[in-house]
Image (spheres, rainbow, N blue to C red):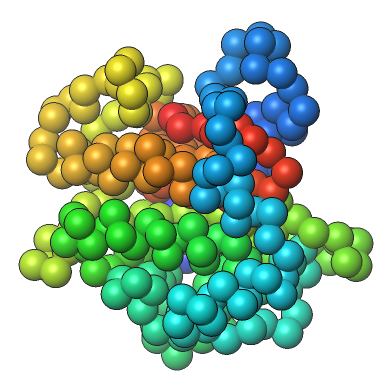
Amino acid sequence: MPGARSSPAVPRRTGIPALALLASSLVGTPATAGPSIAKFPRDAAKAPAVRYAALGRAACLRELRRRKIRFRAVGAAPGVLAPVRLEGKLGGVSIHTDFPVKKRRTVPWEVYDCRLVLAVHDFTRILAAHDIDEVHIFSAWRPPGKRWPAGKLGKRHPGGLAVDVRAFKKRSGAELVVERDFHGRIGAETCGAEAATPEPATPEALELRAIACEAADARLFSGILTPNYNEPHRNHFHLEVTAGVKWFIVR
């Protein structure tokens, strides 16, 4: 992720995708090979993130229809296997960038790979339990460059398989803003027995941890990166589905 500060209205562009360095070194790497923040559970194949990532385009779109998710297929989105736009709320939650409503229908950053939509749809159950009905994102898909080979599928944002969430809004109108409320420390554990306590441990900081860790426990995403990962992630949660892997990263 770039080091430049993001505007809430304009999604950031990226030179190095969020998990690029980690993921490229982890694919096919045994769990015992050197220090890593990746976990390789034996039952990884059962995880939603792994199952969804393995779906083909037709099977994924069928599942969207079975779940009665309102979507529109996108004709051309280089790098994306099954590009779609949401046509309404997902699981009762409105998920969108901060662009004006009319622009949201055309900006590339609101295009998702179908497989990511399935994971986010599951995530909305966690959000509903926290009384959240609106999610503000920087971007999902980030179009690859003009030299991108025709037919090549991307990973992370170039593949429409990652979304950066900057804020969660509750039905009451209260907001959990990642940059303002997370109160983390780079390198600190976010979830699990070794998790660091936010400083200060405000209700908002604790709830942001709970949201991230409940998603991690459910294995909805291959990668969950928070401000504890590095400085470029100070203002968002990076949620990713990665095809062809059986590891999970939470930081």
Residue 188, compared with residue 243, is above or below; it is above
Coordinates of residue 42 in the picture (x, y in percent): 58, 27
| Residue 198: quadrant of the picture | top left
In-front residue for pair 146/222: 222
Residue at left offset 11%, top offset 36%: 202
Residue 13, compared with residue 109, is above or below; it is above
Residue 91, compared with residue 215, is above or below; it is below
Residue at left offset 54%, top offset 75%: 64
Residue 69, compared with residue 17, is above or below; it is below
Coordinates of residue 170 in the picture (x, y in percent): 17, 63
| Residue 45: quadrant of the picture | top right
Number of numbered discs = 0
In-front residue for pair 119/44: 44
The quarter of the picture where the C terminus appears is top left
User: Could you tell whether 48 is left or right of 20 in the image?
Assistant: left
User: Could you tell whether 5 is left or right of 116 in the image?
Assistant: left
User: Could you tell whether 129 is left or right of 84 in the image?
Assistant: left
User: Could you tell whether 15 is left or right of 231 in the image?
Assistant: right
Residue at left offset 23%, top offset 62%: 128
Residue at left offset 68%, top offset 61%: 55
Query: Outermost residue, bottom direction?
Result: 102
Can residue 109 be seen in this snapshot?
no
In-front residue for pair 189/216: 216
Coordinates of residue 5 in the picture (x, y in percent): 45, 48
In-front residue for pair 50/174: 50
Can residue 242 be seen in this snapshot?
yes
Coordinates of residue 155 in the picture (x, y in percent): 70, 51
The quarter of the picture where the N terminus appears is top right
